[in-house]
Image (cartoon, rainbow, N blue to C red):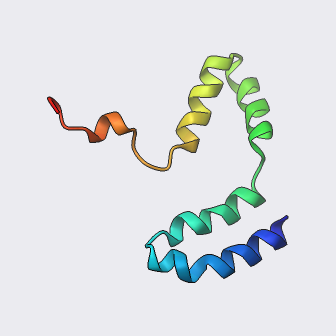
């Protein structure tokens, strides 16, 4: 899977540069090499001991931008 991902990222790199999203594309390499979401869930459940905090942590890890609610001006 790592090799296939590297090849695909390399092929898409020029288009990502055009679209100014190279950092996002490169982050895929990290995802493939890191622990799976299932592994993260198990570790976080062990850490927190409950599902609510586990999900809260996973959501914060998955967020690539700030939440929409913080980008909307007050009164808009």
Spot occupied by residue 60 in the image (x, y as percentages of width and height):
53, 37
Spot occupied by residue 59 in the image (x, y as percentages of width and height):
56, 35
Spot occupied by residue 18 in the image (x, y as percentages of width and height):
45, 79
Residue at 54% of width from left, 79% of height from top? 15
Residue at 17% of width from left, 33% of height from top? 76
Q: Is residue 17 left or right of residue 46?
A: left
Q: Is residue 1 shown above or below 7?
A: above
Spot occupied by residue 67 in the image (x, y as percentages of width and height):
40, 38
Residue at 79% of width from left, 31% of height from top? 42
Residue at 48% of width from left, 69% of height from top? 21
Q: Quadrant of residue 38?
A: top right
31 and 74: which is toward the camera: 74
Q: Quadrant of residue 40?
A: top right
Q: How many labels were placed on the picture?
A: 0
Q: Quadrant of residue 44?
A: top right
4 and 48: which is toward the camera: 4
Q: Is residue 27 shown above or below 43?
A: below
Q: Is residue 71 shown above or below 4?
A: above
75 and 48: which is toward the camera: 75
Where, quadrant-wise, is the N terminus in this rendering? bottom right
Q: Is residue 29 left or right of residue 60?
A: right
């Amino acid at each position: 899977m790592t090799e296939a991902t590297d090849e695909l990222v390399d092929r898409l790199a020029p288009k990502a540069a055009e679209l100014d999203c190279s950092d996002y594309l490169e982050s895929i390499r990290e995802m493939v090499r890191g622990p799976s979401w299932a592994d993260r869930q198990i570790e976080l459940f062990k850490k927190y001991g409950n599902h609510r905090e586990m999900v809260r942590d996973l959501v914060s890890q998955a967020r690539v931008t700030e939440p929409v609610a913080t980008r909307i001006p007050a009164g808009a």
